[in-house]
Image (tube, helix red, strand yellow):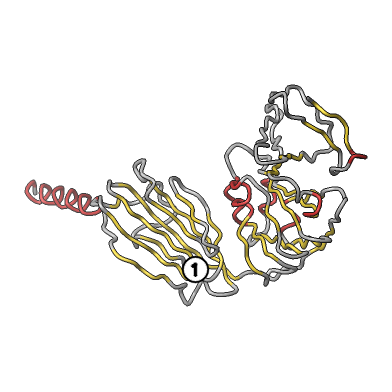
Amino acid sequence: MADNLKLLILAVFAVVHVLADPYNCAGTQTINPPANINNSWNYPDTYNSSQNTAPQYAANQNCSWIINVPKGMFAYFTLKVDTNNEPVLTLIDSVSYTTVITSASPFFLLDPLFRVDLQATKIGSLGMTVTWYKVNPAFPNTVQVHSNGSPLMIFAPDFDNGTVIQSDTRVNLLALPPTMIAPDVSPFMRNTQIYDGPNIDSTHLGNLYQVLTYGKSLVSTGKYLTIYSLFPGFGTIENSVIVQDYFDVKDFKSYKAINCISLLTQCQFSLDARQGTAAAIRYYPTPMFIKDVSMPQTNVLSVYTSFVTPAHKLVDYT
């Protein structure tokens, strides 16, 4: 009996040791959606997203996964990852935007494909899940912005059915972060897509999170821009955009939104006018007071309401 128990204990330790061995993933794998898209793809096969930790990969990995996304579908990609302080995991999406991934984060990805690359010299951990969904039809509302007209603020719930912005010349868009700041839910702005035209069949430009992290405005090539969220209901994170006709901002070398997302912040922002006129906009119903200005004596800071014309100037600071 004692000998049998000893053998059983040894067998258990052997199984645990095998399961804990880091995996190797060398090579390139192409992943297609399953026939039943209710089934997710997991890597490695033993991983699922309900696990608290991801499986370990061995050192010296050079692996790529090409995940195909058919037209009319999108992929929801989640992962758990610890790269051991190496910037070794990257994702390239369908508009060739590259993200270096260092922590768990959600991605909403469109056709035709996206690519994940792992090039690691150290041991780390990585578990990935992809679930494919059909893109729901959009039933957008259309809003208009005009040259020499006031900007317009649009809030996230309006993106669930889609919003088409129509301009006189081109559409200028600035992204604002969620008002919910703990925990950080801004990566869920990847759910909201931007299209360069009057509908979601127009050229896909990327998502709102990319515009936010870029820190600059996005400008349409024509008179229309369409904003649409793939999953409805994420408007609860309370992000928004400021849109206006490009004619009103075309002379600015730099243009950004002033992000006042908390009563605890002082709405600090900086402008770089070394290459020409730089501007920032705050769109909010409560008054804004400038408490402190630091700039060279050769500069002039002008404050306007609604849009930039002499008739709308409030004050100059020198």
The residue under the point 80% across, 39% down is 284
Total marks placed: 1
Q: Residue furthest right?
A: 311
The residue under the point 80% across, 55% down is 245
Label 1 sits on residue: 113
- Report the side of 299 relative to 314 (left or right): left
Type of residue at label 1?
Leu
- Please rate how many residues cluster around mark 1, counting C-alpha atoms within 10 Å: few if below 14, some from 14 to 19, many from 20: many
Q: Quadrant of the C terminus?
A: top right
Say above or below: 268 vs 256: above
- Secondary structure category for the residue under label 1: strand
The residue under the point 46% across, 57% down is 91
Q: Nearer the viewer, residue 303 or 197?
A: 303
Q: Nearer the viewer, residue 194 or 127?
A: 194
Residue 203: which quarter of the image? bottom right
- Report the side of 30 relative to 168 (left or right): left
Q: Position of residue 32 (x, y in %)?
A: 44, 73
